[in-house]
Image (spheres, rainbow, N blue to C red):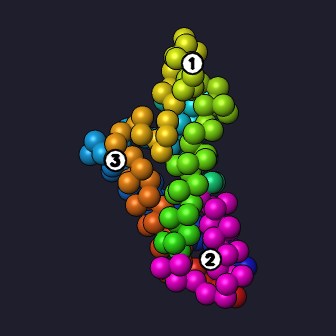
Amino acid sequence: MNPPSAFLWGFLATTVMSIVMAASQGLGLSRMGIPFILGTMVTADRRRAALYGTAIHLLNGWLFAFGYAAVFQSLGRATGWLGAALGLVHALAVLTMLLPALPGLHPRMASETRGPEPTRALEPPGFLALNYGRRTPLVAIVAHLVYGAILGAFYELV
């Protein structure tokens, strides 16, 4: 594995993915803000949540970059198309497994079976994160395709 390449391109891919997701939120395509969701897992202070969540999201992006790099190394090739394919699998796993499980892990999120309480202010994502907007699954897929394509196109095999 090539750790410097995974660190560099993982940082860039995570940054671009975050820009795509933030732009989609700003344009009204989705209400999902992953840094905010992650940040509110560790603090009730909504202002600090964005800062903490951004740091957590960047660390997650780096960790996933090493996973992608391991796949590239094991296959002996890294291409934009292969990275995008991994990004699609990643997005589908996030939308179908991780986000639906989030209410059980998140201390400040309502669940599908229980409504909001005074201490649980966040809406649960729901199936395919559709509670955050009809276009949210598309946004998540595009963002992860971009993430994977950047990693695949620029990661250097050793």
* Callout 3 secondary element: loop
Q: Quadrant of residue 93?
A: bottom right
- The segment highlighted magenta reads 61-82
Say if residue 8 shows up in the picture. Answer: yes
Residue 26 forms part of the magenta stretch: no
Mark 1 or 2 closer to N-term?
2
Q: Which mark is residue 135?
A: 3
x, y percentage for residue 126?
A: 49, 36
Q: Amino acid at mark 1?
A: Arg
**What residue do we see at 56% from left, 69% from top?**
86
Q: CA distance from mark 3 to mark 2?
A: 33 Å
Q: Say whether marks 1 and 2 touch (CB < 8 Å).
A: no
Q: Nearer the viewer, mark 1 or mark 2?
A: 1
**Circle 2: is it few (<14), some (14-19), or many (20+) Cα within 10 Å?**
some
Q: Nearer the viewer, residue 14 or 112?
A: 112
* Callout 1 secondary element: loop
Q: Amino acid at mark 3?
A: Arg
Could you tell me what secondary structure mostly forms the magenta stretch? helix
Q: Nearer the viewer, mark 3 or mark 2?
A: 3
Q: Nearer the viewer, residue 112 or 145?
A: 112
Disc 1 marks which residue? 114
**What residue do we see at 42% from left, 50% from top?**
137
Mark 3 or 2 closer to N-term?
2
x, y percentage for residue 10?
A: 57, 67
**Circle 1: is it few (<14), some (14-19), or many (20+) Cα within 10 Å?**
few
Q: Which mark is residue 77?
A: none
Q: Which mark is residue 5?
A: 2
